[in-house]
Amino acid sequence: MTTMRKILTGVVGLTALAAIGGGAWAWNTLSTTRNAVADYSTRLADFRSTDEAAIKRGEYVMHAADCSACHTKGNGDFAGGYEMPTPFGTLVSSNITPDVDTGIGAMTEKDFFDAVRHGQGSKGLLYPAMPYTAYVKLTDADMHDLWAYMSTVQPVAQKIDENAGMPFPFNIRLAMLGWDMLFFKNAPLPVVAGETAEIERGRYLVEGPGHCSACHTPRNALGAEIAAQNLEGARVGAWFAPEITGNPHVGLGESTVQEVAAYLGTGTDGKAMASGPMAEAVEHSLQYMTEDDRLAMAAYLKSLPGSGKTAPAPLAASTPAMARGALAYEVNCSACHGVAGEGMGLLAPAFAGNHGILADDVTNLAHVLLVGARAAATNVTPTSAGMPSFAWKMDDRQIADVLDYIRNSWGNAAAPVRPEDIGALRSELDAATKLATPLQ
Amino acid sequence: MNRREALFSFGAAAAATAAVTHPAGALTLEKYPTQMALDPAFAPRPAPRVGGQMRVLVNDIDRRTLAAAFDRLMPEDEYGPSATQAGCIEFLDDQLAGPYGAGDVLYREGPKMAGEDALMQAPQFIATPRERYATGLAALEAYAKEHDGASFADLQPNRQDEILRGLEEGAISLSPEVHSKAFFELMLNNVREGYFSDPIYGGNKDMAGWKLIGFPGARYDYRLYADRVGEKLDLEPVSLIPRD
Amino acid sequence: MATNGKADVVIVGLGWAGSLMAEELTRAGLNVIAIDRGPWMDTSTHTPPAVDPDELRWGIRKELLAKPKDNTLTFRNRTDQVAAPQREHGIFELGGGVGGAGFHWAGMAWRFSPWDFEIRSKTIERYGIARADDGEMQLQDWGVTYDEMEPFYDRFERIAGISGKAGNIDGVIDPEGNPFEGRRTRDYPTPRLKTLRSMEVFNEATARMGYHPFTIPAANLSQPYVNPLGVSMGACTYCGFCLAYGCGNFSKSSPQACVFPVLMRRPNFKVITESCVIKVNKAADGKTVTGVTYVDNQGREQIQDADIVCVTAFQVDNVRLMLTSGIGQPYDPATQTGTVGRNFSFQTISGVDMWIEGEVMNPFIGAGAHGSQIDDFNSDNFDHSELDFIGGAGILTLARDGAPISKAGKLPAGSPRWGSGFKKAYQDNYQTYTTIFNQGCSMPVKGGYLDLDPNYKDKFGVPLLRLTYDYAQSDRNMAKFTMDRSIEIAQEMGAKHITPFNFADKPFTTAIIASDHVIGGAVMGADPATSVVNPFLQSWDCHNLFVVGASAFPMNAGYNPTATVGALAIRAAQAIHQTYVHNPGSLVEG
């Protein structure tokens, strides 16, 4: 679907839905009776928690939910101002410091709960760019702790007009009511009988604060996650958030929980290596979690059956594309990725046995080949080595060749890469074209 | 593009990241740069794909003189193509058109003193390579006209060799303005550069220079071969930029 | 105008010395601003594997180096001559960007010998004062001993991940390593590199001759490595593109590969690039400095104030900054008084080129520091009683590269240089060529020094540095002696053609690149009358100024200088944050 059609579809859908907002359906969607446990009386600006344990737990919830990723312009001060381009216009993240005039200093704890868990803010309904669809699953205890933590944040006066960049009708916050009625499941995490405590904890972290599905679950034309394909992989801008279920071909089935947890904590399990958006998730959020929590998340993810995708027969090494790819690999890639795809320590990912590179969607591989990427930098893996860009050196077919080679060597097997897909991404990223050389 | 931008531009064409350039403003780096596109100043600079159109060597006589000299320095024979067949004229033209030809790295402030060459034990120049070719080639042609009554390019190969050897040994001085021995060395260095540098620069056509000696070119990993000590490897040479 | 607030420390030049000091000082909590005249450069964005293997651009045109147009010196052999500028690339191979020469170096990572640090005392002790004071040489001790340096060498080797094999751990000699080296507390952090064909032939021949060959310690890492800062490095691929090149796979130690990943993320560090420091600013009383003046990339003069100034540029620029800033007394060769500029030294190089018929060397497989060496004729490892020189040379063979443009000049004597004869000779000899390089020590001479040139200026109108220098006779004799040894070795190696060379059999010149290891001019020592900085690299004149680099070496050893620069930098930085900041003032009694 083209961008234009997608936008048009959204316009029709949202305006129609806004018109029918009302009745019991809307009441169920909007109900915040769960939040009655919160304090109604004291404004954040007038509150400073003295419960150090709660503050510390709240900071942990903040990291797990990665609030600072969006509510800052880069310095982690929670003063908002971060611009988020959406298909419907540009949103700006709000100031969530305790400043009374420009932040959330006038909110009570109840107001805060309403906003975080239900998308109902002081200025009206929130846009679902705020992942309240996931945060609705946050427990009361975590919410109380988060409130305690927020009371310790330094107030910053910075006025934000969140939806100034949204055109009509998307600048009407009430329009979100229709969206909410369609897609917002107003309920805490259901209890699953027979589940181990570890899996239950993992499910809470993944589906609640971690909001993994925000990237890893495909969305429909109105930007809502498709529940039936939960965590089965999705295109996210010019990246592909891969399937992170127990699927053995393109998911986490062949990795141990320890490996998955190591990846979450450091950006690498010794084979795969986080870059792009996942590197940020590791840097800003996952590295701060406890190893037990990361193991729980891994256990839950691996317990999901996933998509059922299976490995195709590998491309024969004798094909011309594979032969060209083999030479290109030796010339360009093996210095870092290893003569047998074994990678290079904590610096560069392995390809042999790395299921993260086998998805049908090769966006990530093509993205990093075209414009490069940095690995995640964490306190235990500070190197954050750079993958250089190759757009200037390889044309679309040459990139497809080398990707075919790494995806079908050393025991790997994956579908052939189409040069036109590389070309489309090259345009989308505005990456360089291959340099012309003298005619030989 | 970072994660938040990526997330919220789902489905839509993501705003392309700004092309990295040499930062022009205040150049204070307070964080580790994350932009990974190749710095444009470091991208290879292939010779233009113009098919023989010259930018510096535009004078036909100069170019014929140069071609004749280059092809004596590196003739066509059983070991491979000649300098001109390998693209060394196109190579040199591109080099002279760029920073090398302009003497971009040279400290060119005067005065140039009488004793400089002896002190440095090497001839010193304020002139750029572009200027040295202009004067040198003209002087070489004038020398042939004066002594042989013909263009240098039209002389017999053995006579051309004789003149070149005279330059090399310092026996022939083309003119007071030209350090003839140094001009010979300039041509010899440049023809070797053209013959043995990466084909992206216009010379070393079909990697003939590399094949002559068995140099594998722009490879970056010999771990598969390092233990094969003393063994002839016959690796296929590769260029910095592969053909389309 | 001051553009930044006052810093705790300003660092002038972010090469090995600057980045190692910045790492120490920021880890100790100090706010550090570095100023570098070059642009930002990094592995993946500037010299990735797809850009690096380009001999014309990096090896021949030397585009990673600072341009002589922007940074050069004038040179003369004697004070009665008028100095001329070094117009093309010569022996001064300064870095062109952040990382300095540490970005394009080959990677030989030596410790100097115990003898080097106490050269005057040890020479007098073994051979008598007449050998030390021969009327020409200006020998002086460093003010620090090898044993005092050992922990800092060790720290540098750990940060850089050096590959090698120890020959002396706590006095226990291992014949697999260098049996002549100073006492180490532990082995190198990574194993030595592979033994390639030219090394094999050299090792066998020298062993037969009773010498002690070993693999050169290299900053080209034999295996992946994580350094004490947590930074990961890669394994060398033997691609051969090291000296004058970057490294595309993080396997050649450099500020970029070893330090920047942590340093650049520290909130108390920043670097101002493409900005050239032209002066260290003195306080009114002249006892301290207040910061530096620099010209930014827009050509504007700026001031950066700081409590401590660390001048960590390339050797010649360290000396020039001292002279242009008017700090310390310039050296006068007529009276040998004054200190700034004294004890310039180079290296004294001889050796042989050789061709061993029938060999297949595969010269394109190698690395910048890849080679074998004997130290049997280095330092004071042999008896000089009956010889007409002191010191010696590391006698080494290199498996560095097979770069086809530069190797075109390496043909047996009598081979045609052009024509079909050249092509045949090159084809026949490319695989059979190897070399022995004698990297000799260099003793300072009374007439050798650095000062400001009266005639030539740089683009800012600042006078160029002027070098006045020629080899000491002792060094010339040494080069001849070691050349003769290398001929014998080449013969034992079975060479059919041998071409000896000796750069010291004629006057010194900056235009012929015998070596690029220039040192001295702001030397360290225990005596303020003969040194610019004390043993912690602290200025004798201004106690909050530290001048760090090879400029501090009072002589040059038969080894490459980088590890010693690194060790001195770490030692100076630790002295600053452990001692100086708590009690500013001279760290030693003058």
Image: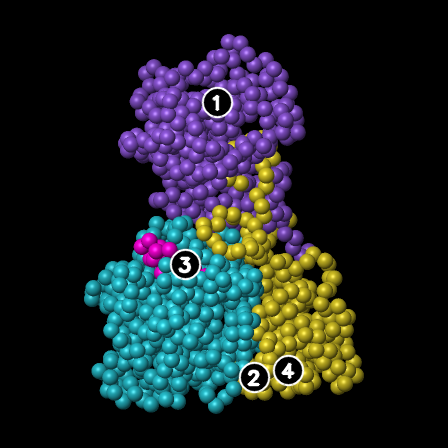
Chain for disc number 2? B
Secondary structure found at label 3: loop
Question: Horizontal and vertical percent for residue A435?
Answer: 63, 52
Q: Amino acid at mark 3?
A: Lys
Question: Horizontal and vertical percent for residue A371?
Answer: 55, 45
- Residue named by callout 2: B117
Q: Amino acid at mark 2?
A: Asp
Chain identifier of the yellow chain: B
Chain identifier of the purple chain: A
Find the magenta span and give its range.
Answer: C21-36
Residue at 63 percent across and 58 percent down: it is B46
Residue at 42 percent across and 62 percent down: it is C305
- Residue named by callout 4: B179
| Badge 4 or badge 2: first in the primary sequence | 2
Of the residues tagged 2 and 1, which is closer to the observer?
1
Question: Horizontal and vertical percent for residue B142?
Answer: 75, 82
> Residue lying furthest right in this view?
B149
* Marks 4 and 2, how far apart at CA: 11 Å
Secondary structure found at label 1: strand
- Residue named by callout 1: A120
- Residue named by callout 3: C6
* Marks 4 and 3, how far apart at CA: 54 Å
Secondary structure found at label 4: loop
Structure colour scheme: by chain
Front-most of residues A110 and A200: A110
Q: Amino acid at mark 1?
A: Gln
> Residue lying furthest left in this view?
C171
